[in-house]
Amino acid sequence: MCATCGCGGTDGAGVPVTLAGETPPHHHEHDHDHDHPHTHDHPPTETVTLEQRVLAKNDMLAQQNREWLTARGIVALNITSSPGAGKTTLLERTIRDLGRDHAVAVIEGDQETLLDADRIRAAGARAVQVNTGAGCHLDASMVHRAIDALDPSPGSLLFIENVGNLVCPALFDLGEYQKVVVISVTEGTDKPLKYPHMFAAAGLVILNKIDLLPYVNFDIETCCRYARSVNPAVTILQTSATRGDGLSAWYEWLGERIH
């Protein structure tokens, strides 16, 4: 169980990292601490102390990831959203449009299946699937082992598609260059206010599926105002990954970070 949020993860240890389309690698035993808080047996201060230890360990591993990526000129983006916001579709379109000019690799985070990694490979990029089981987020240890399996080339663009969740991924640094939040117009206008920690941590917010605006009750101006109320410096782009609206601005944003 995740010691921080109570999900069914294992703080990175024992979570299978499977290279999509190939035989899963053999896993060796690792010496990791597994702390399980029991709030009914311990005072609240024990839970706080345990959370601090878990996040401190994660931050240390994330910094190691960041140093490795930076030394090789790899730009890693942590893509987060609620389930169904269109992260994978956006990445498929991006790979097809930019893959001829830039090396792109993807770490796919899901609770189960290789479905998204298969989609990414079909679009033309190498992918590693991280299945978290009952876990609700990726952590730095999982990403470290995924990077080791994927071995992205120097100077490449690395997308880390996190598990669909706007809560726990805000807490866990993966060693990324920046977090990108994708929100769909089929969701509520008030998402930035309901999940302020995620939006506050983001360097970019993408409002996706704008082709559906005529059919849903979504106020873009209000949503942008809410996002900037928790993160005044955030960049906000509007896209339709299926129709292609706004993708040139997304590619320009990426290009400014690749070069």
Image (cartoon, grey):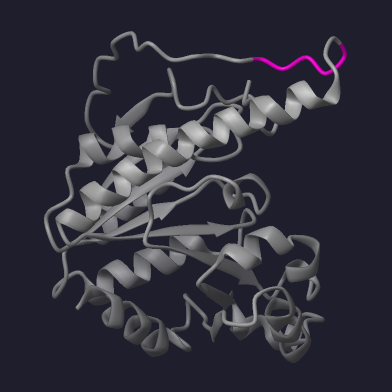
Residue 43 spot, x, y in % from top left: 85, 19
Q: Residue at x 82, y 81 (%)?
A: 217
Q: Relative to residue 231, is residue 115 drawn left or right?
A: left
Q: Residue at x 17, y 62 (%)?
A: 73
Where residue 55 sits, quadrant-wise, is top right
Q: Relative to residue 42, is residue 120 drawn left or right?
A: left
Task: State the quadrant of the N terminus.
Answer: top right
The answer to whether residue 243 is above or below residue 196 is below
Front residue of 30 and 132: 30
Residue 39 spot, x, y in % from top left: 83, 18
Q: Relative to residue 57, is residue 158 drawn left or right?
A: left
| Magenta-highlighted residues | 36-40
Label count reads 0
Residue 63 spot, x, y in % from top left: 36, 45
Q: Residue at x 79, y 26 (%)?
A: 45
Where residue 75 sits, quadrant-wise, is bottom left
Q: Residue at x 35, y 12 (%)?
A: 30
Front residue of 116 and 102: 102
Residue 79 spot, x, y in % from top left: 47, 59
